[in-house]
Image (spheres, rainbow, N blue to C red):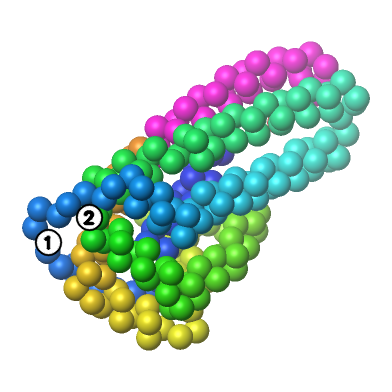
Amino acid sequence: MAMGRWLAWLCLTGVMLAGCSVTVKPAVSAAPKPPTEESIRHLIAVTQLDAVLKEIVNRGNAILLAKVEQIVTTRHLNAEQVKIVEEFRGKVIAVLDDELSWQRVQPIVISTFQEDYSQAEVEALIAFYSSSAGKEVLGNVPRALEMFNEENFNSWEAVRHEQGEQAYRDRIMQDLRVALQPKDMDGLLAFYESNMGRQIAASASQAKLHMKQRMQVLNDEATTRWQELLAEYKPQLKAAGGNAP
């Protein structure tokens, strides 16, 4: 349940910080100076990664609410059953909001950047996303966020079921690259085909792996917590004469 949301944010973040539909050969850099926390926070502010995460969580909650409403209407639950389902729904959303809150995710972002990016790379990303070319990419973020809807989530899940985890991730990344791609590609290509851009692409590859591992911990915690809630509320719903959501 939480996986779709944090993976969506992770994919979108990866596309934003590693280039939209840009393929480059990584350059090799030696003993780079790690970025300061202040510069990472500046990059977060410029790219609004915290706001992007919040919007994805909100969209996921809206999908969950719609599914619960569908359960209530299609299963003809009585008043007591509806009350139980709505209480369960509220607690599940609270769990997801907590596990995917920016307060939980921000330390992961900062530590990942400090481990995998250099100070020069972070400064270059800040400069790019402050430029007209970078602002055009950021201007397409709302369009990319529109992709996080129930129809696309179901489509991506179908890919995962039929083709496996890697195909599932590749499909999300591909769709996001298309959504974020600016009309004028010259500025984007110039940046990511530069030596610095190639270094950033190499760093992003490692960063995505490390962030995925760290975010998986939050996902596992969220999964455990909502499964415990399901175990708590399923007998209550059964006793009231219905089935668990």
Q: Which residue position holds label 1?
A: 29
- Tell me if 129 is positioned left or right of 210 in this view: right
Q: Would you place residue 60 above or below residue 240 in this image?
A: below
- Which amino acid does the dot numbered 2 rest on? Ser
- What residue appears at the point 67 percent right and 26 percent down from the top-left corner? 91
Examine the structure image and report whether residue 240 is included in the region drawn in magenta.
Answer: yes
- Which amino acid does the dot numbered 1 rest on? Ser
> Dots 2 and 1: beta carbons under 8 Å?
yes
- Count every numbered label the image shows and give the total: 2
Image coordinates of residue 153 in percent, x first then y, are 58, 54
Q: Would you place residue 185 above or below residue 151 in this image?
A: below
Residue nearest the observer in this picture, 211 or 73: 211
The N terminus: image quadrant: top right
Residue nearest the observer in this picture, 125 or 74: 125
Residue nearest the observer in this picture, 120 or 169: 120
Image coordinates of residue 234 in percent, x first then y, are 69, 20
- Tell me if 209 is positioned left or right of 1 in this view: left
Main SS category, magenta section: helix
Residue 160 shows in the view: no
Image coordinates of residue 163 in percent, x first then y, are 42, 56
Q: Which residue position holds label 2?
A: 118
- Tell me if 194 is positioned left or right of 208 in this view: left
- What residue appears at the point 49 percent right and 45 percent down from the top-left corner? 6
Q: Which range is magenta? A: 215-242
- Mark 2 lies on a secondary structure that is loop
Q: Residue furthest left?
A: 30
Q: Would you place residue 244 above or below residue 136 in this image?
A: above
- What residue appears at the point 29 percent right and 47 percent down from the top-left corner? 36
Q: Residue furthest right?
A: 79
